[in-house]
Amino acid sequence: MILIMEMNLDNNYWSDLKYKLKTFYPQLTGADFALRNGTTEEMLIRIANKLVISRKEFNKIIAGL
């Protein structure tokens, strides 16, 4: 399983990932991807919560994209 917080995300990869997530989950908005308090992990937890899935399930989704 890939943990996104451990990945070195470049801007192109992150832009592509956000696009795919927004495509598959239209309820996600640009505001959901905003870094608040500067932590990527907090943002990813917030997105998983909005999708009503666990963080572990969200990691699997990201790994599959």
Image: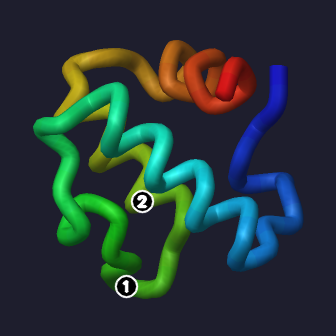
Residue 37: which disc? 1
Q: In what quadrant of the picture does the C terminus appear? A: top right
Q: Where's residue 57, x and y in %? A: 51, 14
Q: Where's residue 17, x and y in %? A: 58, 49
Q: Is residue 38 left or right of residue 63?
A: left
Q: CA distance from mark 1 to mark 2?
A: 8 Å
Instruction: Check contact, mark 1 vs mark 2: CB within 8 A.
Output: yes
Disc 1 crowd rating (10 Å Cα; few below 14, some 14-19, many 20+) is few
- Relative to 56, residue 12 above or below: below
Number of residue marks: 2
Residue hosting label 2? 42
Name the residue: 64% across, 63% down: 14
Q: Secondary structure at mark 1?
A: loop
- Relative to 16, residue 34 above or below: below
Q: Where's residue 5, x and y in %? A: 71, 54
Name the residue: 42% across, 59% down: 42
Name the residue: 27% across, 30% down: 25
**Amino acid at the residue labelled 2:** Glu
Q: In what quadrant of the picture does the N terminus appear? A: top right
Which quarter of the picture shows residue 8?
Answer: bottom right
- Relative to 17, residue 38 above or below: below
In this rendered view, identify the residue nearer to me: 36 or 13.
13
Q: Is residue 53 left or right of residue 2?
A: left
